[in-house]
Amino acid sequence: MSEVLLEVTDLKKYYPVRAGVLRRQVGTVHSVDGVSFSVGAGETLGLVGESGCGKSTVARSVLRLIEPTSGQIRLDGEDITHLSKTALRPHRRAMQIVFQDPFASLNPRMTAGDIVGEPIAVHGLATGQALEARVAKLFEQVGLRPDQMRNFPHQFSGGQRQRICIARALALGPRLIVCDEPVSALDVSIQAQVINLLIDLQKQHGFSYLFIAHDLAVVAHISHRVAVMYLGRIVEIADKDELFRNPRHPYTQALLASVPIANPLAKKLAPLVDGDVPSPVNPPPGCAFHTRCRFAMERCKTERPVLMEAGDGHQVACLLNDGTGRSQ
Amino acid sequence: MADTSDLVLDVKNLKTVFFTNSGLFKAVDDVSFTVKRGETLAIVGESGCGKSVTALSLMRLVSDPPGRIVGGSIMLEGTDLLALDEAAMRKIRGNRISMIFQEPMTSLNPVIRIGDQIVEAVRLHRNLSTKEARNIAVEMLHLVRIPEPARRAREYPHQLSGGMRQRAMIAMALACRPALLIADEPTTALDVTIQAQILALILDLQKELGTGLVLITHDLGVVAQTAQRVIVMYAGRKVEEASVEALFAAPKHPYTRGLMASIPAVPAPGIAAQERLNEIPGTVPSLVRLPKGCAFAPRCKLAVKRCEAEYPPLADWGGGHLAACWRAADVAEVA
């Protein structure tokens, strides 16, 4: 993973909270609060976290679907953070997104073929029969039959609809596909089909994924590297195997311990954290996790830990043991 | 099996159908099971397999029309719920049998305080003054480990987090100490750390109160960590039933086996990560046009001619391990 495709530096996205008749600003949602990461060419970076941790906001900011408050997004070395809409347009071809809900992200009045062909037509890459041939090829690539091009979204099952979304994302030959919870709405047996498809497509085309999910097992399966987010910040980032074998941040450890294992003989569920995620409107000072952390110290309440190298590209933001987050 | 005195629930040949414009849906087709005191029975399956309709049938909450329970019996502590009229059923619902749903926000009344909603449930079934009922409500909120229960009782549902709301639902469901609790995907809408808390809570309370529990879920991990016995449903039918250990050690039905192979595992020391997930080809069939034989046959690697022609009966493979498959004996050979 030598070549860096996407580089995000200190990304922040704040939303104002307004109240009262005059809609005065009464607070700020710190949705994404200083996130930095990079995705290599042909690499899959998994982004996990619980609801409200800002993972979808990161996904959308990276694509400039929402404007970040501050920070820098570099695609292929070029800073795209402040490009105008027209200047951004050629870059849009390089980055695509697949959303969670294949029922809501497809226009119900367009045929599946038109949905997949639209980006090609918009960018003026093909028309008429050439367009149709390209769409037919995309349908085959994602495991749909070309004769299904004339069908409407409601005639497809959930898994097939997600395949249409994937075909649409592939249409412009992207280098980065952002997947925002692409399999969460699907049944287990269908989920496996879609995950296998995503992995196969990456092997064929060599593009990168920014793969966002709340399901650790799914992320573990598809990713090369994994970043864990908590309340708008990345708390740990490492190679997949390293992260799951040797989780260093107490939050990552708690997340892993909370996943119910499909083996009745394996250790029983032991919730390692109490309470709920605090509100991102007034995130706790210091380490945002200190309110739920088993190892919280006095320092954690005031000092904000930064991501520090803990060996082998394993980075962790924790004050325990001088930032290595080792709990024992 | 065990003596029948500690049976809380005994469901026999339950059949629930829906009359729709596109035809007759057999949502639950000839399903039987039992739950003992303090036991957890998990019902697993994918969307549309009939697991939620089974739960609603037990509560007699299937809306008619379009649905109707057309056969079988549901014995709760010796009373056949299907023979009761609506008034008698209302006395039992929320009292001897209660239910928690997936989405706590849609099952709580948004304009009534949490405590008052529990008071309402308690006073409906027990002859208590408002004050006594209020004490019980606070006690219940304390039991489900809501911090500062007296203050929380005066709050509205929107002031609680998702996990807290589900705790409040559990408090309400258990307020009358029911013999049977039905939990329909109780943690699906929750984050994984909260899910672990809620599951641990449900199991603790069940042990403490001796409630029978029917847990409906699509998550095999949740099943493995919580249930004693498991039913696997596919297209409205029970295709397999076993103790949780037997089921995970050696599933007899190819569908169960396929489901288990298709879930990705969190890598752990000593477990090599799978290269590729095992996929079950195709999709769940429409309940209106079910094949004549085994509903899983079109997706099954082991299917033979007989599977398409005849529905396999549930056969006992020892120790109460039931499976409805003509090829159950050969399942272990195929990875």
Image (tube, coloured by chain):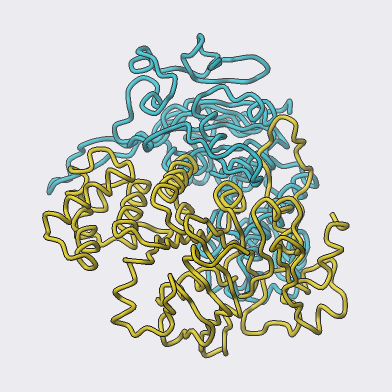
Q: Position of residue A50 (x, y in %)?
A: 47, 41
Q: Position of residue B10 (x, y in %)?
A: 52, 72
The quarter of the rendered structure image containing the N terminus of chain B is bottom right
Q: Colour of chain A?
A: cyan
Q: Which chain is yellow?
A: B
- Left or right of B307? Residue B75 is left
The single residue placed furthest to the top in the displayed view is: A322
Identify the image quadrant of residue A209: top right
Q: Position of residue B156 (x, y in %)?
A: 21, 52
- Left or right of B63? Residue A170 is right
Between A223 and B62, the one nearer to me in the picture: B62
Q: Position of residue A245 (x, y in %)?
A: 67, 27
- Left or right of A104? Residue A202 is right
**In the figure, B30 relative to A34: above or below?**
below
Identify the image quadrant of residue B230: bottom right
Between A219 and A3, the one nearer to me in the picture: A219
User: Residue at coordinates 56% horizontally, 64% vertically from top-left?
Assistant: B3
Between A99 and B135, the one nearer to me in the picture: B135
**In the figure, B157 relative to B49: above or below?**
above
Count of numbered tags: 0
Is residue A218 at least partly visible in the picture?
A: no
- Left or right of B37? Residue A169 is right
Is residue A186 at least partly visible in the picture?
A: yes
User: Residue at coordinates 72% horizontally, 73% vertically from top-left?
Assistant: B314
